[in-house]
Amino acid sequence: MAELAAIGLASNILQFLELGIKLYSKGRAKYQSVSGISEEDEELITDTQRVRSLARLIHEGNSIPDKELIEVHLYEIARSCDVVATALIDTLDELGVGTGRNRRWESFRKALRQEFKKTEIEKREGRLRNLRENLILHLVTTSSNRQSVTLTVVQNLKGQNEKLEAKTMTKLESIQSLLQNTQASDANRSIEIISHLDQLAAEVRSVQRQQKILSSLLFSKIKQRHIAIQEHHKATFHWIFTANKTQFCEWLERGDGFFWISGKAGSGKSTLMKFLATHSDTQAKLQTWGGPRRVVMASHFFWSAGNAMQKSLTGLLQTLLYQVLKECPELIEVVCDARWKNFESTHSDPWDDAELLSAFNELSHQNLSSLKFCFFIDGLDEYTAGAKRYHGTFSELIEVLKAISSSDSIKICISSRPWNAFNDSFGQGNWNLQLESVTKEDIRRYVQDELTSDPHFQHLALRDSRCTQIPDTIVTRAQGVFLWVYLVVLSLKRGLSDEDNYSDLQQRLNQLPDDLEEYFRHMLQSIETVYWDQTTRIFRVAIEAEQSLPLLGFEFLEQEMVDPGYAIRMETQPLSAKAIAIIWQRLKKRLNARCRDLLYVHDEAGEVGLLSFQVDFLHRTVRDFFLDTNVIDEIFRQRPTRQFNPHLSLCKMMLALSKTLDVNNTNSEVFNHIFILADSLMYYAWQIEKNCLQSSQDGENHQDQSRPTEAFNILDELDRSNSELLKQFGFHWTNLKDSPKGMFQEYGQKTFLASAIQSRLSMYVEERLRQNLAQLRQKRGRPLLDYALRPTMVTPLRVLSLEEGPGLRIVKLLLDFKADPNHSVYVYDGKTVWELFLEACFQHAGSGLDIDNNVEDIGATIQLMISHGAKTPCSLKLDDGTVVDITDIVDRLGLSTYQTGQIKQLIEQNGSKQSVLSWITSWVS
């Protein structure tokens, strides 16, 4: 609206000036005239009437209350014109004598003679010409400035577009071309151009909004699993597009719903899914299904060894939605309607399942006459709801997939192991494929290209023809398991490089078990005893890590064996690119010797410096093998190794890594790394506390009571080192992290203890408060109790293992330390901690989110708060004006009958106490 107001005012001023100059110029010519009225004279009178109208419009524009809507220079010109216009209106008002044409002209000419001398007319005309020149200069400058600013924004958006891979580049280049070819030469053209520039600027803002919403969907590991899947052989899997082999082509061209690819562990499902999701033939055949409508493909690869986003429903939905919207950015306004309308306050907020499902619901039910969608989702069996292990029925995942595919415009290709839950849901129709039954020729081709084409093998085969039997033996024994073939070929090629003969190769092959788990045991047993202490440490931290670890972390793991306190003592010093490269070369060899190909190093896309090289399990089955068999403990009993706590080692590793970050480059990625490492450290410290508390509850003697104390010291050092590194910001470093959904206002008052409360570090919080209880009273902004009651936090780590309910143990601890449940919080308009908690309970209970996991803790927290003096009855006024009290909230939460009864009994007891107190007070008075 501001742009429109400015353009309208400028246009009115320009017309006024042009007509005013014309009027004075003709009036000056008529000053000496004695002739009667002519056609030209009639035009002059018409011009005066138009000038009168324009002058009034300028006066109205000049009286706009909010002057910020209009550029300052334009406003000054308008004010000057207003003075001239006012004088001119006064003059013209005096011309309204008589009604006849001759009388009107005579009156006008007479008035000119009476009102002005010739010099006065010239003076006023000159003033108008000066104002016009100023206006032209202003408009040309304004159009140039707007053009320059908009071009800069477009250029920045193009750079951001490359990161997002969004299909907005053509539009941006078109806008850029229009801007570059826009030139202003006169005032009329300038007004037209400014109007045009404002239209282009509005388009740019729309693209900017699209990109920011896309950025909110993008997370750091969104491509990691897709990139990490190894393409074992470029010639494999083409058979799937052959009609007589499978029904997959028919499904692509004419089918709907689901196509299920099942297969044994290690059979190549992920490799096939990556092949299908990226192959041009897939898109071509899907277009037959799409007909005149464009078919958009998107994919997600579950990864149980990855972070929470790589193995959760949130990660699945966010990945698919991101890929769809980057291909079709025009859908963002429609599909993300609420976020688009409330853009300024919500565009960067984390997405939750409810909002993501709402977006897919919009996508499913939109009348998208020009689009259809096909999704490829790999590894349903690797879905773990964000946890390390999953023991559910997969019903929540399957229900969501079925809801999405219910649209005629959406179909989904899925892959998984042949587990009952998936067989029951997807295995009953014709649209399915058992992978190991059709990959024999693929395996034969792979063995031929990778083994028999090896120069060492060819040279040996010339000397001993029996070598030709080895490929057939591998294909027969493989039973469709590609991973087994890959490992066997790797072992044989290693032998060939050591000049193994046929007998040696055959012996190697005979010793390798057909079963993958037995093969893994064989690989572990082959590791030299001298490395075993390091091997157990490496595998244990890899298993316990919440996501893949940077290669540099294993350098620090080795340092710990020599100096257990290295992380606290080490100096803060960024590593150079040269130092990182040297470490990479050395550690890659050392890891291979100690882990026998079960772990591998890969280059992490989009990462730089110390986080660019990551260590991961060769395959999901390797990690499952360690988790399911306790093989490390078995071998531990056979071979002597030193005791160590993997979670404590991970705490040290995270601290050491944070000290090597280059914080001089303070871009968003550096801050992201700071909080990934800090949140990881706090998560592993929480695991130490949890295990310690569990041991105490079980009546066991904790193996090393010093471990929590060691973790506490590491936490203190993290706070000290990050505070020193980021002191230039003038507030505590934890305030650099965004608050979720704009709900929690910090105003720079957050502390490390508050972050520890959010991370549920109850033992650490207790220890530090006992040392300095004043922290409880001195905390400004949000009280510490509020963090315990509403601990939700944003973390790039996305640790879903930490539930979002209240931290019950810390709530009790703080209440025992005399935290006030009725503390009024000024940053929340004076609401009390108790009221804020009840408000959060009400919102969560009505949001559709699953709160079953922590509903008991919520009920217990309500009881604790009332028992420690929280005000009852307590009523809340909602945004829509509705008033609810605590009993409404308790009923809405769906607590157990017993817990609900206990809470209502406490409320009644409080009410009775207050009634007695009121009676005593009134009686005494």
Image (cartoon, helix red, strand yellow):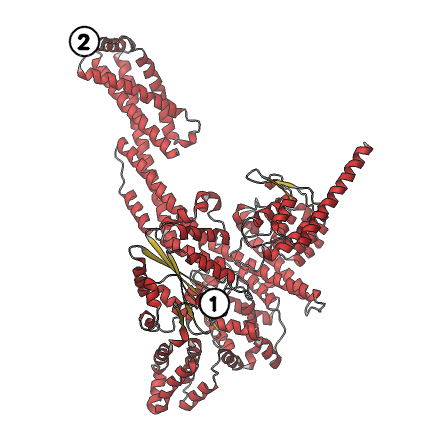
Quarter of the rendering occupied by the N terminus: top left
Q: Nearer the viewer, residue 396 or 681?
A: 396
Spatial separation of the CA atoms under disc 1 and disc 2: 105 Å
Tell me which residue sits at (33%, 57%) in the image: 295
Q: Quadrant of residue 856?
A: bottom right
Residue 704 at x, y = what percent? 68, 68
> What type is the residue that disc 2 sits on?
Val
Judging by the rendered image, the residue that carries numbered circle 1 is 424
Classify residue 101 as left or right of residue 281: left
Q: Quadrant of residue 39?
A: top left
Classify residue 100 as left or right of residue 358: left
Q: Quadrant of residue 490?
A: bottom left
Tell me the crowding category of disc 2: few under 14, some 14 to 19, or many 20 or more residues within 10 angstroms, Cα based. Answer: few
Q: Is residue 670 visible?
A: yes
Question: Nearer the viewer's eye, disc 1 or disc 2?
Answer: 1
Residue 715 at x, y = what percent? 61, 59
Q: Is residue 572 visible?
A: no
Judging by the rendered image, the residue that carries numbered circle 2 is 34
Q: Nearer the viewer, residue 527 or 891?
A: 891
Residue 86 at x, y = what percent? 35, 17
Vertical side of 575 occupied by 905: above or below: above
Which badge, 1 or 2, comes first in the chain's sequence? Answer: 2
Q: Nearer the viewer, residue 241 or 798?
A: 241
